[in-house]
């Protein structure tokens, strides 16, 4: 029996979920649309467009020209460089705590040499000192302008302000939906607060509604009274650990909150609409809502809505399935159709993950799909009520044309706009007698900043209808029927293209896709049934018997044996060395293209066995599935990248000169001993081994004892890929005996090691000793860990910083050489950051690695657990405890621990712990923070969360680490993007996954030939 099979291209993301756009079908659809609705659409659109272009008075125009908020928007439309820097500054602005700080950041962002400033803005920035009167004046002017901009798009910072906004809207015969601002809910305390605030919001809105006079256009339809109050909510905000992989757990936690919310809404007489967020949550959101709204208690509710986003390639299918579901339900609900607000985020994520892009490339394609979905939705108005959300005059006119043609009853149709985005269009639609609902975000400016930036981007983008209309483009151009762009036709199977990328990484499995998720979970069950088997070493192409063996245990359940692994003795180690010596010359002479081809075959086999390999890591090393998924991708990448690199290097370099040729080329070293770690049990040993192999060396791979079964699986793959007998050998054994013997052996040419500093330094020292009969100096590549720090300054995005620190510190229970073990926080935000950090960590799910909800699993073994507990005890003696989460029974569990106000002299601030223990340190200045970060013997990874350009530049120059990550987590380096490795006592050698790495496994040679014969030499170009 084989594990669940991976389909071709399945790992490329949702290749099966985004249907190919058929040209003929699209043409037919467009023709039908034109025949039925186009003439009426054009007539309605011209009326609406005329209303949006009404001339303003001279005094109104003069007033707008003098307003700084309007000036800022106008400048960004004509200056892309200023647009980027200004929006970055606006994003940072709410975190700045003084006018001097605002002035300094203005100069840093807008004074960038690449930005061409308007004269008025240039004059404002011409101050010498941020504390000066001109600096204070500039800060006041800009911050006031941004606040004014925010109030254009945000309905209020308090419920009282929102109620005033609503009353104004109702006077204009417009209804509303209210949304609480905020993008990320990262703690369970925040999730509860979000829920409680919605209960309070509904109560206040419905209480206020009692005094509102009746407006028939928006409060009644078809003889039915409509809810006067409506709120819009996000599902993921009800559960901070919402994860598409954890289908059942996420559904249970979120559904509980939805039921309570809907019950309370019914009591109060409020309507509830569910927003759609990022693509990763779409399927889960729809599945949860469909299941819940079929329950008897909610099946007859019509005061509920769901959102669909037309920029998604598979949104048409979602709507078709929703219509079929609504027919089954028997009671209609509302579908808010929007174009989508996360285009940049979705395209970037798809590119970074090497997944198929879920959104259309071209704005016209989104507009065309929006019209297709509008027609489908409105033609099924008896099953789903349509709420058409757009600021595009043509899009709204098209919907109105359909509604009028089909004579859709008013209850089943409304049009929606965002607050502050299309006021004139909304008024014109109201004047035509249609119900308009205004989406009203409310809340404080800091959580609302990402919303504000999205609105500014929409207003200033070249493709924005609002901007094009403002520029008074020709009416025929603005109102032309949209057509699916060529770039968006027949996209099935394509992955997001990255400009300038020379190496295409293996895509992770996308667990938001049900098929890929189910296959991964099935593989865990498949592997579980195969635990406990025996695995023997591979020497000279034969699996050999051994006198000793070890039981590899499941760290989540130490009573469960993953496999029994035979351990070689010193005599067998010598046999392996001799086999490698015998195979060495033939392997060196094998053409590099053939060696590279074997690595490509191995990569393909890993791709086919992705889910199985991930499952073995889950069981043998306690690595949660999300972490194991990325590791398989990294192993595949190492095979393909080093294969490509060897073919590049194999060409050599010609330094020819008149009368002579000079050829620079490489040859293999000989025999390489690879001593691999358990914490990256597949990726790191694969990378070290295949780099040596493709360079023409023979490899003896001695794995960490606790991850020997996974290396047995790697051995199966390399043998199947075609590695010749004796070229690669799997030699599990005791490190103190077999490992030390291989290191000291005179036939060993090179040792590559990843592990502890203690063992790495011993290997380095032993390899330096010339053994009897040894005719070469051994090379050592050693990666030996770190004491990695993340700095968080006062301008940081705290949502981003807290999430990044938590993942970097506690992902895989802190058992990564790149993990964050120190976070250095600047004084002004220290207390707030610590509070949110503690709550975010407290919200993590602890459990067995094979459970989909687990974020923090076990540590590797009893020795590791006991060592970590000793460090925790030292921390108690030297520092203040902020959080200690309980440990589970039955496995090697250690709950996350956070110490605060940790002095730099404390043991936990200086020594590598390799577990879920985090030291939080306080710094008075950025200079001090850098000094603290650099104050250890390690230099592996480091991070900075900051929106201060000068701090970012200073960190680039002075942060002493091999890999510096700015405004993101510090783990998860990707081959050929973030080549990985450090210096100082973090290791020696070039970066893995980088262009220099293979050179360590090669000996460079130069051959010079005098090509003159009796004074004659060939001259290039001569006859």
Image (cartoon, helix red, strand yellow):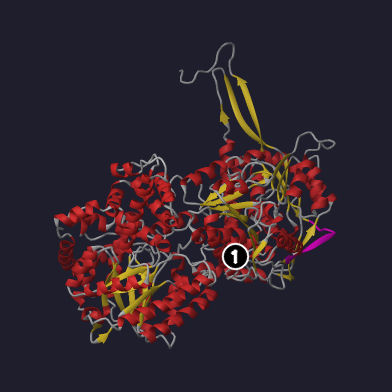
Q: Is residue 890 shown above or below 475? A: below
Residue 497: x, y in percent? 43, 51
Is residue 390 left or right of 574 when viewed as pictured? left
- The part of the chain drawn in magenta is 544-553
Is residue 569 left or right of 327 when viewed as pictured? right
Outermost residue, bottom side: 296
Outermost residue, front side: 133
Front residue (pair 900, 472): 900
Residue at 35%, 49% in the rendered image: 137
Residue 680: x, y in percent? 65, 56
Magenta region includes residue 549: yes
Q: Is residue 1004 shown above or below 176? A: above
Q: Residues within 10 Å of mark 1 (few under 14, many from 20)?
A: many
Residue 471: x, y in percent? 21, 52
Front residue (pair 480, 888): 888
Asked where in the image residue 203 lies, by quadrant, the reply is: bottom left
Residue hosting label 1:
625
Is residue 296 left or right of 989 when viewed as pictured? left
Q: Is residue 325 visible?
A: no
Q: Is residue 54 visible?
A: yes
Label 1 residue SS: helix
Residue at 18%, 68% in the rendered image: 428
Magenta region includes residue 769: no
Residue 659: x, y in percent? 56, 17
The number of numbered discs placed on residues in the rendered structure image is 1
The quarter in which the C terminus is drawn is: top left
Outermost residue, top side: 1015
């Amino acid at each position: 029996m084989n594990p669940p099979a991976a389909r071709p291209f399945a790992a490329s993301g949702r290749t099966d979920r985004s249907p190919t756009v058929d040209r003929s079908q699209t043409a037919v659809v467009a023709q039908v649309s034109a025949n039925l609705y186009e003439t009426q659409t054009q007539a309605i659109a011209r009326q609406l467009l005329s209303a949006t272009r009404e001339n303003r008075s001279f005094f109104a125009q003069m007033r707008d020209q003098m307003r700084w908020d309007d000036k800022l928007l106008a400048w960004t439309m004509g200056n892309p460089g200023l647009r980027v820097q200004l929006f970055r500054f606006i994003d940072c602005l709410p975190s700045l705590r003084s006018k001097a700080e605002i002035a300094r950041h203005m100069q840093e962002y807008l004074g960038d040499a690449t930005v061409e400033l308007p004269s008025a803005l240039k004059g404002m920035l011409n101050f010498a000192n941020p504390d000066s009167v001109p600096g204070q004046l500039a800060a006041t002017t800009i911050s006031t302008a941004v606040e004014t901009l925010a109030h254009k798009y945000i309905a209020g910072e308090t419920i009282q302000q929102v109620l005033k906004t609503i009353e104004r809207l109702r006077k204009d015969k417009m209804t509303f939906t209210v949304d609480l601002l905020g993008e990320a809910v990262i703690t369970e305390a925040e999730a509860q607060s979000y829920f409680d605030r919605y209960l309070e919001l509904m109560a206040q809105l419905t209480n206020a509604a009692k005094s509102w006079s009746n407006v028939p256009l928006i409060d009644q339809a078809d003889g039915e009274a409509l809810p006067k109050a409506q709120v819009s909510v996000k599902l993921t905000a009800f559960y901070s650990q919402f994860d598409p992989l954890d289908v059942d757990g996420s559904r249970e936690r979120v559904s509980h909150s939805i039921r309570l919310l809907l019950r309370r809404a019914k009591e109060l007489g409020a309507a509830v609409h569910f927003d759609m967020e990022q693509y990763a949550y779409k399927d889960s959101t729809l599945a949860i809502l469909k299941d819940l709204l079929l329950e008897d208690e909610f099946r007859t509710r019509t005061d509920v809505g769901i959102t669909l986003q037309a920029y998604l390639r598979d949104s048409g299918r979602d709507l078709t399935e929703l219509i079929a579901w609504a027919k089954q339900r028997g009671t209609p609900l509302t579908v808010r159709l929007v174009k989508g607000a996360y285009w940049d985020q979705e395209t970037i994520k798809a590119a970074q993950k090497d997944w198929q892009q879920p959104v259309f490339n071209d704005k016209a394609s989104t507009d065309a799909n929006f019209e297709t979905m509008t027609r489908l939705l409105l033609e099924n108005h008896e099953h789903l009520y349509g709420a058409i959300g757009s600021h595009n005059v043509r899009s709204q006119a098209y919907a109105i044309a359909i509604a009028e043609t089909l004579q859709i009853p008013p209850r089943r149709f409304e049009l929606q706009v965002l607050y502050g985005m299309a006021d004139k269009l909304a008024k014109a639609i109201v004047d035509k007698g249609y119900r308009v609902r205004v989406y009203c975000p409310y809340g404080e400016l800091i959580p609302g900043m990402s919303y504000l930036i999205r609105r500014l981007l929409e207003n200033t983008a070249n493709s924005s209808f609002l901007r094009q209309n403002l520029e008074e483009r020709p009416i025929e151009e603005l109102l032309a029927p949209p057509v699916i762009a060529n770039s968006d036709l027949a996209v099935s199977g394509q992955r997001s293209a990255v400009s300038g990328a020379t190496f295409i990484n293996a895509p992770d499995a996308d667990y938001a896709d049900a098929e890929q998720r189910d296959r991964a979970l099935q593989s865990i069950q498949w592997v579980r049934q195969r635990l406990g088997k025996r695995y023997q070493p591979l020497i000279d192409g034969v699996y050999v018997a051994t006198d000793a063996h070890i039981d590899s245990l499941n760290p989540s359940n130490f009573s469960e044996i993953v496999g029994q692994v035979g351990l070689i003795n010193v005599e067998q180690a010598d046999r392996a060395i001799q086999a490698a010596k015998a195979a060495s010359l033939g392997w060196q002479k094998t053409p590099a293209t053939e060696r590279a081809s074997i690595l490509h075959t191995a990569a393909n086999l890993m791709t086919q066995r992705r889910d199985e390999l991930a499952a073995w890591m889950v069981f043998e090393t306690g690595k949660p599935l999300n972490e194991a998924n990325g590791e398989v991708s990294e192993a595949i990448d190492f095979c393909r990248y080093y294969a490509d690199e060897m073919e590049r290097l194999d060409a050599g370099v010609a330094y020819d000169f008149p009368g002579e040729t000079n050829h620079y080329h490489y040859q293999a070293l000989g025999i390489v001993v690879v001593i691999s770690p358990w914490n990256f049990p597949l990726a790191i040993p694969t990378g070290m081994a295949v780099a040596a192999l493709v360079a023409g060396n023979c490899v003896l791979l001695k794995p960490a004892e606790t991850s020997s079964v996974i290396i047995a699986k790697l051995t199966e793959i390399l043998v199947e890929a075609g590695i010749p007998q004796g070229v690669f050998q799997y030699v599990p054994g005791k490190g103190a005996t077999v490992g030390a013997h291989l290191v000291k052996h005179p036939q060993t040419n090179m040792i590559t090691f990843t592990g502890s500093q203690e063992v790495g330094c011993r290997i380095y020292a032993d390899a330096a000793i010339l053994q009897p009969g040894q005719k070469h100096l051994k090379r050592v590549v050693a990666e030996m860990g770190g004491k990695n720090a993340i700095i968080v300054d006062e301008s940081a995005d705290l949502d981003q910083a807290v999430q990044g620190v938590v993942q970097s510190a506690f992902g895989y229970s802190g058992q990564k050489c790149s993990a964050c073990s120190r976070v250095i926080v600047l004084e002004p935000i220290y207390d707030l950051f610590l509070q949110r950090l503690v709550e975010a960590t407290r919200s993590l799910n602890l459990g067995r690695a094979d459970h989909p909800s687990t974020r923090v699993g076990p540590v590797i073994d009893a020795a590791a657990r006991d060592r970590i507990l000793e460090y925790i005890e030292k921390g108690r003696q030297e520092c203040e405890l902020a959080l200690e989460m309980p440990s589970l029974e039955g496995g090697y569990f250690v709950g996350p621990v956070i110490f605060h106000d940790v002095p730099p002299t404390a043991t936990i601030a200086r020594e590598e712990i390799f577990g879920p223990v985090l030291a939080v340190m306080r710094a008075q200045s950025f200079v001090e923070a850098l000094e603290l970060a650099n104050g250890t013997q390690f230099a592996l990874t480091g991070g900075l969360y900051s929106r201060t350009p000068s701090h970012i530049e200073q960190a680039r120059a002075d942060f002493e680490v091999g890999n510096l990550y700015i405004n993101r987590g510090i783990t998860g380096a990707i081959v050929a993007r973030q080549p990985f490795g450090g210096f100082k006592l973090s290791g020696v050698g070039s970066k893995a996954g980088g262009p220099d790495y293979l050179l360590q496994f090669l000996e460079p040679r130069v051959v010079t030939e005098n090509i003159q014969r009796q004074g004659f030499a060939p001259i290039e170009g001569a006859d």
